Amino acid sequence: MTKPTNPYAQTYSDFLSETAEHQLVVLHDEGLYRHLRIQKPGTRTWSWDITTWPGHLATSGDIADGYMLTRELDMIEFLTISRRSRDYYSDGAPSIDVRYWAEKLCGGRAHEVKKYDQHVFLRHVKDDLGEHEDLGGEAQRLHERQLALLLRLHELRGLDEAAMQERLRAHWKKELSDIELWAADDLSGEQFEKLDSEFAWSELADGPVSEQSPAGCAAEILAEARIHADGEHEAREWLHENSETFGEDTWEWDLRGYDIHFLFTCYCIDLAARLYREHQAQQVETLEAVPA
């Protein structure tokens, strides 16, 4: 079964690169009162502390600094990723519900960890274009089927693709009507029936064939969106100016993404919880190994 792509793949890759040699240091461990430090031995660079007390978990350090989450009595237990959710994504990242974790931030900080993200804006634009009646995937497939039908029509007449392109150019210059472009009077009944069964003539013929493919038009619009993607105000203005394409409801689009610092914090908490559970398991094994 193919694993899904991690939406935060680059952030996770950077996190793995910077924490490959990190280890757990247990500074305090008394029930729900814990002080855990995760660091590369000999340096505090890219290190962080996890402090827990009943109903709370706080992070501090060189990264993951200044966050506090609350929900259950044991927040380490609450935020521990299940074994089934580990290695969930194609890059080996765990499945963390970032939105859900953000909701557990104290002091209403859930809204602070999201900010305008040009990648989110462009993804909205791309997704909307993909579903667009005249520019999306269905429109592109229809366009390609029309061209294939026209080519087959010309082949039956003993003509080649160059001849078809010449007729299309005349069509786009309005020198050839839709009816003339699709004229099939010179075909035998058998030839026409074959065309109809192979291409569904009634669905494709008798209509205009656009000079530029829907995919090409969509690509141009997406390229223009990239030019206006630097800031949210500019992106919103561009969407408004292109309301004929995207509709009037783009103001409802959430163009924000999770701040990289919070994403790092989620990965920091996950790694700390995993190392702490491994530490607990080792302690149990040590105790069981001691002769009675």
Image: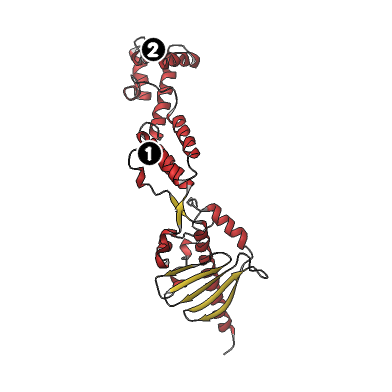
Q: Residues within 10 Å of mark 2 (few under 14, many from 20)?
A: some
Quadrant in the rendering for residue 218? top left
Residue under the image location 53 percent in, 53 percent down: 9
Q: Residue furthest top?
A: 186
Residue 107 percent location from the top left of the image: 41, 67
Label 2 or label 1, whichever lies nearer to me, is: 1
Determine crowd level at label 1: few under 14, some 14-19, many 20+ residues with C-alpha closer than 10 A: some
Which residue is at 41% across, 43% downward? 236
Residue sitting nearer the eye, 245 or 140: 245
Residue 43: image location, x then y, percent: 66, 68
Residue at horizontal 44 percent and vertical 45 percent from the top: 121
Q: Which residue is mark 2?
A: 176
In the displayed structure, would residue 19 be above or below residue 231?
below
Residue 104 place in picture, x, y as percent? 41, 66
Q: Residue furthest right?
A: 42
Q: Position of residue 27 (x, y in %)?
A: 57, 78
Q: Is residue 8 above or below residue 153?
A: below
Q: Nearer the viewer, residue 47 or 165?
A: 47
For label 1, the residue is 240
Tell me which amino acid carries mark 2: Leu
Element type at mark 1: helix
Can you say whether 25 is above or below 120 in the image?
below
Is 236 situated left or right of 291 in this image? left
Image marks 2 and 1: residues in contact by CB distance under 8 Å:
no
Instruction: From the viewer's side, name the closer residue of 277 and 262.
Output: 262
Mark 1 or mark 2, which is nearer the start of the sequence?
Answer: 2
Q: CA distance from mark 2 to mark 1?
A: 36 Å
- Mark 2: secondary structure: loop
Residue 34: give its label. Answer: none
Q: Quadrant of the C terminus?
A: bottom right
